[in-house]
Amino acid sequence: MSRPSIRELVLAYLMAIAAFAYFAGTWQDGNTLSRLGLVRAIAVEHRFEIDTSQLDPAWSEFRTDDRSFFNGHYYSDKAIGSSLLGAAVWAPVHLALQMAGLPAHGRVFKVGATCLAMSLPCALLAPLIYGFVASLANGRLALLVTSAIIFGTPVFRYSTGFYGHVLAGLLLFATFLIWFRGRLRHAVSLGEVFVSCVFLGAMLITEYPSALLAGVLAVYMLFVQREIGLLTDWRVFAVGAAGGVLAISPLLYYNLAVYGHMLTTGYQHHATARFAAAHSQGLSGIGWPDPVVMFATTFHPLMGIFWQSPVLLLAAAGWMRLRDSQYRAELLFSLAAILAYVTVMSGYYEWSGGLAYAPRHLIPILPLFAIPLAFLPQRCIGVGWALTAVAIAQHLVAVSARWDYLWRTVRASLDDVHHPTTLFISTIWSVCWPNLQHGLFLKNRGTLFLGSGFTSLLPLLLIEILLAVLLIRALDRRERGEQATR
């Protein structure tokens, strides 16, 4: 088993950063504004209330319906994990900007906080995926899988806005890698146990539904413990519990300070009546699984993940190797986690994600597709690159376009129980692409020099091509060196 070079991992990271930062902070919606409101409240005002962004006319662009109201104050109704990270990053930046006499509000805050606290961390998915696949197969397949997931899925666009989905997926995949490496070494240190459980706890307070993924991963962790002889070691469980409690303690403190109870969340105090009514049903808005919604989130042209990212279909070729693979446990984990999450989230009252072009609630599972794709047969590589090209093209359209008319189109395509009513409509090709044709481009770094239009994308494409060439040269050099030493 070979290991990718540091140069390869750095180049993979730079490819992701270049793409995410190119669009970072140039779009926001109610969900992101709620999280950013809490970032500013903590980092600048040192409090949890987001009253300033909701009541001060100077901050009117940050007003949102995604908020809670309790004891006369407004609060973010979202899981606080991403906002805590944002506040930790933005507080020193805000102070430095003030000391330098530079602006630290408005667009500077939206773009800066999003890029530093969301895009840069989320870009770590690229080297993690690349390193995982390269250690099992080869650099070319690692580049394919990394490109497919980072640029050919909603991971791309949702790493440019202040959400928590990609961050949760990053924490999930990083935790998996710790235990996967431990299985290969036949040893997991107590430090690794602690860090992995901190990651799981951080994932939970970033996206509440990810608790299901934590449960599935816990089964895999127990399997690894059993295989390496740690299942009866009480220290592993004690250290793991300490890491998990440490990670979720900020949320418990926040809930207690704001709502007076550790287990009360913002979803139970919605300031928006329709959200309050929806979240009062089932488990915070999640009811029984819905087969129609399962189809809508996976294969339906409106926003199905396999329609928008057809390369993910090739994961089936990897899962077919379950019987003859020494990595059967890893393949089973990925399959179980993906199926369980798709099934449970199909019961969510607004599976389409509101103002969204993809079923954004499924984003945390997208990195897990790297596991079966790492076992893609050689005969499928050509098809894989073709499908990856299609996926990247579609998501580049989605990340480049403004979302004018998107909400109206999606609403018109769903009936009263949120089931699609037609097969002949797509958020990408029925909304995003026509918007681009009419000049409705999202602002990006290229528009600063080249104006709005397709030419604004040229710098990004040239940068990505250059980095890809450098990465291919680096992996070729490494693989030639390995062959020479055999």
Image (spheres, rainbow, N blue to C red):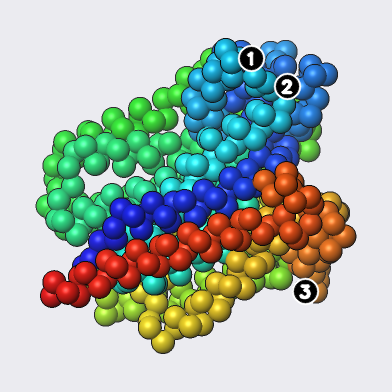
| Residue underneath mark 2 | 53
Vertical placement of 22 versus 342: above or below? above
Q: Which of marks 3 and 1 is nearer the N terminus?
A: 1
Q: Residues within 10 Å of mark 2 (few under 14, many from 20)?
A: many
Label disc, if present, on residue 349 of the rendered structure: none
Q: Which residue is drawn at 27% across and 66% down?
A: 478
The quadrant of the picture occupied by the C terminus is bottom left
- Amino acid identity at mark 2: Ser
Q: Residue at 75% across / 55% down in the picture?
A: 401
Rendered location of residue 197, percent (x, y): 32, 39
User: Quick check: can you spot residue 217?
Assistant: no
Q: In this view, does 70 lie to the left or right of 431?
A: left
The N terminus, quarter of image? bottom left
How far, Cα to Cα, is label 2 from label 3?
40 Å
Q: How far apart are marks 2 and 1 (CA)?
A: 22 Å
Q: Which of marks 2 and 1 is nearer the N terminus?
A: 2
Q: Name the residue under label 1.
A: 101
Q: Where is residue 307 in the image (x, y as percent from the top left)?
A: 64, 71
Q: Name the residue under label 3.
A: 423
- Lower sequence index among marks 2 and 3: 2
Amino acid found under the numbered disc labelled 1: Gly
Depicted 397 relative to depicted 236: above or below: below
Badge 1 crowding class, 10 Å Cα cut-off, few under 14, some 14 to 19, many 20 or more, is: few
The answer to which of 50 and 236 lies nearer the viewer is 50
Does 144 sit left or right of 232 as displayed? right
Q: Nearer the viewer, residue 31 or 126?
A: 126
**Which of the 4 quarters of the picture holds residue 186?**
bottom left
The type of residue carrying mark 3 is Leu
Instruction: Single out the mark in the foreground, 2 or 1.
Output: 1
